[in-house]
Image (spheres, helix red, strand yellow):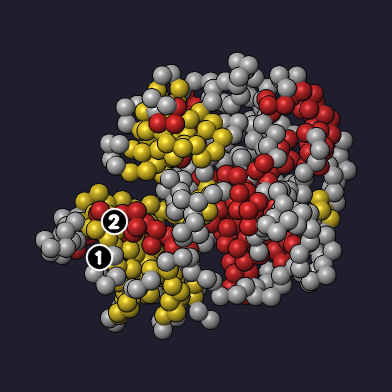
């Protein structure tokens, strides 16, 4: 049996390699038991010289990763199906996202515009809030670990390979640096116990990289990167000017003054709705950040660091410690994750295209979908060929065979909020949906707004219709409660999930 088609755990047949990094190799694979395509992450416990190249020196670490991610139920977090050990090596089995990483997208197609950066930022903030709510830190947020589904544009946070619970350190017992230095928060560089704020710093760096092609902290050496993160003046790219209050608020070196996830979400939502971000009120009192107007000729905005001696000593000691750990591979210095390759057309990544300051254009639906502007005051993307119908409470968009149905309901908010409503619906499920089973309700977010996800399987309203599965999200926005759901035959779940994610990603209120 060839390497490319070897069978893992008697079930998962590895087909072609999707990517390789310091933590492991990701394969496209067939789950021969359930007849579906999956992604399998083959973990690397040691490098070619026998030294530890990742935290995975036993099966305990991948089990911890799988358990951490399996607890996260969020549309923008990768789904973990299984974890297995084969011939002494651990493998994590995940959903297969048909699309490349944000880093690959930047390299192939050029820089992301401001509207798209805001959309990606909102998706990642939702994913991070879900993780942080369970006490899980990602600790390696960068463009290479963000997937963009090709058919729907869905943003998926993946590779929780070094995810730890809050309070863990940046240096492993073997002396390896955990994470990507260009995206690592200064408090982690200084050896301070890190919390959720560190992931938010990384998001600020990621937004700069998506808009300009590289991290503001890119340097020629690890020592230079550490000095830039901890001490140097921070110069944000000109392309980030429309989102400057968000970027600078996230790149506040003092984690106590850094923007919270809720604050960053509110600013990004404001941009999505109005095409501008307010420049007052952020960052908080005492911050070292300086704001510049968001105009087309806005200069690169520096952020002066408070002059401190201690961080430099810590950074120097960190470089010295890492230098003695078996060479550069030990500290996982990854320049490939920043999306710094030349954009399409041959222009270097450091070139400065015109800064976008006008409101975003109307969203364009992914291939196979159309934008539907509904007379009840909202827009969403629905599959081509779907027809609209409505009653006094609900709006439906259905396929001609009525197999897959998209529904929207608008009502007044209630005191128990979306989570309470979904829990009540779950309790009433057996009386409202024949054959109700496998129901579950999960607290989540939608574009930073409090939301709840309800999933269940049921028998359908007739034998001819057959068993069905429903994805249903409820959230509060601008004084109303919105419900969006997709129902489909159980045999078309992958198609239904794509339709559900796409409808949500492109759902907007009309002004």
Sort mark 2 into few (<14), some (14-19) or many (20+) by Cα contacts within 10 Å: some
Q: Earlier in the sequence, mark 1 or mark 2?
A: 1
The residues tagged by marks 1 and 2 sit, at their Cα atoms, a distance apart of 9 Å
* Residue 390 in which image quadrant: bottom left
Which mark is on residue 403?
1
Q: Which residue: 67% across, 31% down?
A: 332
Which mark is on residue 492?
2
Q: Is residue 268 visible?
A: no
Residue 30 point in image, percent of width and height:
36, 38
- Judging depth in this view, the residue of 70 and 397 nearest the camera is 397
Residue 250 point in image, percent of width and height:
69, 53
- Judging depth in this view, the residue of 471 and 105 nearest the camera is 105
Direction from residue 320 to residue 448 in the image, left or right: left
Which mark is on residue 286?
none
Q: Residue furthest front?
A: 2
- Judging depth in this view, the residue of 222 and 417 nearest the camera is 222
Q: Which residue: 52% across, 62% down?
A: 447
Residue 428 point in image, percent of width and height:
22, 60
Residue 140 point in image, percent of width and height:
61, 40
Direction from residue 427 to residue 256 in the image, left or right: right
């Amino acid at each position: 049996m060839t390497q490319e088609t070897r069978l893992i755990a008697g079930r998962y047949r590895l087909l072609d390699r999707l990517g390789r990094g310091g933590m492991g190799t990701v394969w496209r694979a067939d789950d021969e038991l359930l007849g579906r395509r999956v992604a399998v992450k083959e973990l690397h416990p040691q490098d070619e010289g026998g030294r530890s190249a990742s935290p995975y020196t036993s099966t305990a670490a991948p089990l911890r990763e799988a358990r951490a991610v399996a607890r996260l139920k969020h549309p923008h977090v990768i789904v973990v199906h299984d974890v297995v050990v084969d011939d002494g090596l651990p493998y994590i089995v995940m959903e297969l996202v048909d699309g490349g990483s944000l880093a690959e997208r930047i390299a192939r197609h050029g820089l992301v515009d401001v509207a798209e950066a805001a959309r990606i930022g909102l998706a990642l903030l939702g994913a991070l809030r879900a993780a942080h709510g369970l006490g899980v830190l990602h600790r390696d947020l960068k463009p290479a670990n963000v997937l963009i589904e090709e058919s729907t544009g869905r943003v998926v946070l993946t590779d929780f390979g070094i995810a730890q619970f809050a309070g863990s350190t940046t240096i492993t017992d073997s002396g390896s640096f955990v994470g990507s230095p260009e995206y690592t928060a200064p408090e982690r560089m200084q050896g301070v116990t890190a919390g959720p704020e560190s992931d938010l710093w990384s998001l600020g760096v990621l937004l700069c990289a998506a808009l300009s092609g590289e991290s503001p902290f890119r340097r020629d050496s690890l020592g230079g990167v550490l000095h830039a993160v901890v001490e140097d003046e921070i110069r944000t790219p000109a392309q980030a000017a429309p989102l400057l209050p968000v970027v600078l608020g996230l790149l506040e070196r003092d984690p106590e003054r850094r923007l919270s996830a809720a604050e960053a979400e509110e600013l990004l939502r404001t941009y999505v709705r109005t095409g501008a971000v307010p420049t007052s009120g952020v960052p908080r009192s005492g911050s070292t950040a300086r704001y510049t107007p968001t105009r087309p000729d806005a200069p690169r905005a520096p952020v002066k660091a408070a002059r401190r001696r201690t961080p430099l000593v810590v950074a120097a000691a960190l470089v010295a410690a890492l230098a003695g750990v078996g060479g550069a591979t030990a500290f996982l210095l990854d320049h490939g994750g920043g999306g710094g390759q030349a954009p399409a057309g041959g222009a270097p990544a450091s070139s400065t295209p015109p800064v976008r300051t006008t409101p975003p254009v109307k969203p364009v639906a992914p291939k196979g979908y159309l934008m539907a502007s509904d007379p009840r005051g909202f827009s969403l993307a629905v599959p081509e060929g779907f027809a609209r119908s409505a009653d006094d409470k609900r709006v439906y968009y259905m396929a001609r065979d009525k197999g897959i149905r998209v529904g929207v309901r608008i009502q007044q908010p209630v005191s128990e909020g979306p989570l309470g409503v979904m829990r009540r619906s779950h309790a009433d499920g057996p009386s409202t949906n024949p054959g109700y089973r496998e129901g579950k309700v999960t607290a989540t977010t939608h574009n930073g707004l409090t939301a709840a996800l309800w999933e269940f399987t049921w028998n359908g309203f007739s034998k001819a219709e057959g068993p069905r599965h429903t994805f249903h999200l409820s959230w509060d926005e601008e004084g109303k409660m919105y419900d969006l759901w997709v129902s489909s035959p159980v045999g078309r779940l992958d198609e239904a999930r794509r339709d559900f994610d796409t409808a949500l990603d492109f759902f907007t209120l009309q002004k």
